[in-house]
Amino acid sequence: MSGAEDRPTGQLTEAEAVAEWADLAQAVLAANTAYHRDDAPVLTDADYDRMKQRMVALEAAFPGIEAALAGPSPTALVGGPVAEGFRKITHRVAMLSLENAFDAEDVADFADRIRRFLNHAEALTFTAEPKIDGLSLSLRYVNGVLHYAATRGDGMVGEDVTANARTIADIPETLTGAPEVLEVRGEVYMSHPDFAALNERAATAGTRTFANPRNAAAGSLRQLDARITASRPLRFFAYAWGEVSAPLAPTQFQSIRRLADLGFQTNPHTVLCDGPEAMLTHYRLIERERATLGYDIDGVVYKVDDLGLQARLGYRSNTPRWAIAHKFPAELAWTELLGIDIQVGRTGALSPVARLKPVTVGGVVVQNATLHNEDYIAGRDSRGQMIRGGKDIRVGDWVQVYRAGDVIPKVADVDLTRRKPGSQPYAFPTECPDCGSHATREEGDSVRRCTGGLICPAQAVERLKHFVSRAAFDIEGLGAKQVEYFFADPTLPVRTPAEIFTLADRDAANPLQKLKHRDGFGEVSVTKLFAAIKAKRTIPLDRLIFALGIRHIGETSSGLLARHYGTWEAFIAAIDEAKDQSGPAWEELRATDGIGAVSARALVEALHPDSAERAEVDRLVSLLSIQPVAAARSDSPVAGKTVVFTGTLEKMTRAEAKARAEALGAKVAGSVSAKTDLVIAGPGAGSKIREATRLGVEVIDEDAWLRLIGA
Ligand code: IVH
């Protein structure tokens, strides 16, 4: 195909060059699939490279060649991982989002609006299909060959994830009988069993686990190294299209069927409806089946079936007029409360956890749910007012379990008609179930706390877990499981943060011997762990303050304190000076923007020079090199503004966005209120946008934000 028989490019006509180039492209793409997805190379490296070189030579001799095929060359797309982030791809047809409907009235309004817009008297036909909770992807095929795959990005410009998309079995490399140009759009997602298995593997390996299948799918697709994507079980449903050189069919329904004929997976729960009533019937059917589908969905999408009418209806700035997403409400289910366990948190809080007879809620099997605190179980809120009509919750009761999105399941209600005779109100323990210390409630606090402090093993383990968590020291290979393991280990225990950093030295007397033959630890993993620990001896001040796990001092306060005091020395000197909760240092601490008296008190109490806890902290600090944090800028366009991030951010993680905003002097809040200056909304944002609109707060997308901060 290439090599000795290559004709000099100067002797080729343009048509011959295009034909040869297209053949080579197809072969290179097929070789990529065989290599990345199937782990079964079909070409030697030398042949593969020669073919790509020939393509490059053809491209150089015929500069129009790529335009002739309407898209960038696979020579640019294939090959190793892109060094710095992903290449950008401008969508030829924007990738839009959908307007949301929350109830039957919204759906009826949608149908009415369309009828009025079209001045259409007769009934309209709609498709109804599940709204897949994954991330959207655009696949461009030219002459039946996958040309590129791009994420949605901001809807106009996405990221080139071609190499990654090729590893997904549901995405065909080539199509037979497709229009010359065809952009297939759909959702990349991960099934429930694949998600569970992936997290299980990650937990065992001590690496990051994902909060839900959507995050897992997004994290897996947006990997710079396609081999990682290849190891993750992603799937793809096709449900729409972008640019097409010839229509697929006259209707939405038939177009989707055509995509299925071309080899795409399409959702089997897609039906035609003759109006709102039929749409709602299908919605209820899908809602009932939601738990057994095996993947996450978050609603039902309705689309006008006739593509001629779709074209007349057109688009608003960001959403089509011809489609709407009818979202599911939070999921509910009833089950039996088998028992109540008390978990002790890092600050000693006793948290009641419901042990439930397993029940499927929103597609996930739930066996545990939070019961919040002792008042909640007794049927009171934090001010002593009745909740649930004053009904208490007892072991053996039938309870309603509630789950909304990523949120931890909650016990919401209790069915008194099914209460067992002779049942007793739940007696909340007044002693710590772990260390036996007295558990007390402070005035005005709804939480009962173990007073054992450092002597309570449960608190100590939880503090360690917090210490190594992602926003704190984030030590690779030292997750919650490993912390429990080391904590309980009699030969080489890790019971305090400082002991993490002395682990290697303590092991050094008999290098690696003590650790390496234990469950799950080989020489390589021990060496890696020591290296990961060593790397974190250097730590930014804000992370250190957060890692200490002091009550009321979360990530935000830690960042504020770090930016205010700059260095550990300045910070701890100020805390020492403020220890009696009076004087200028105390006033300064209390007046630090965003800190307040409660947090200030918690800090000076926890870090009091006479406390055992402080001795621990000093020991830890002596083992670290603490990086100072620069003061927040006051000259940026967002300095002093309160901003809220909502929806999925696509250019950076939430943590990163927050850190950058704070470094520019902005305050990052979790919810929208009258004090909010700006909401930055990514795809999937919902109620916060509505709240912002209601309050007249400006809403911008991620790109506009990046422009604003000059990134
Ligand atoms: S249609 C022009 N159909 O929902 C409209 N979208 O909230 C194209 N989604 O960005 C989208 N399932 O990522 C459509 N069956 C479905 C869908 C679906 C999930 C996602 C898609 C879109 C988002 C809008």
Image: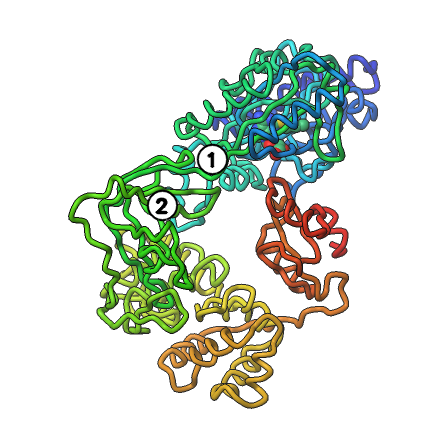
Q: Residue at x 46, y 28 (%)?
A: 287
Q: Nearer the viewer, residue 412 or 169?
A: 412
Badge 1 density bin: few <14, some 14–19, many ≥20, Cα 10 Å: many
Residue placed most toward the observer, 408 or 386: 386
Circle 1: element type: loop
Name which residue lies at 46% across and 67% down.
547
Q: Quadrant of residue 146?
A: top right
Q: Position of residue 515 (x, y in %)?
A: 29, 59
Q: Which mark is residue 413?
A: 2
- Is the C-beta of the residue carrying label 1 under 8 Å from the nearest atom of ligand 1? no
State if disc 1 and disc 2 touch (CB < 8 Å).
Answer: no
Circle 2: residue type: Asp
Location of the N terminus by quadrant is: top right
| CA neighbours of label 2 inside 10 A, class few (<14), some (14 to 19), many (20+) | some
Left or right of 149, for residue 288: left
Of discs 2 and 1, which sits in the foreground? Answer: 2
> In this view of the protein, can residue 46 be seen by the observer?
no
Left of 534 or right of it: where is 434? Answer: left
Figure quadrant, ligand 1: top right
Q: In the image, is residue 6 above or below residue 400?
A: above
At 36% from the left and 45% from the top, the residue drawn is 413
Quadrant in which the C terminus is drawn: bottom right
Q: Can you identify the residue that label 1 sits on? A: 232
| Cβ at disc 2 under 8 Å from ligand 1 | no
Position of 270 compared to 430: left or right?
Answer: right
Report the front residue among 641 and 562: 641
Residue 335, horizontal then vertical, whole percent: 30, 39
Q: In the image as oriented, which residue stretches furthest toward the left?
A: 422
Q: Quadrant of residue 333?
A: top left
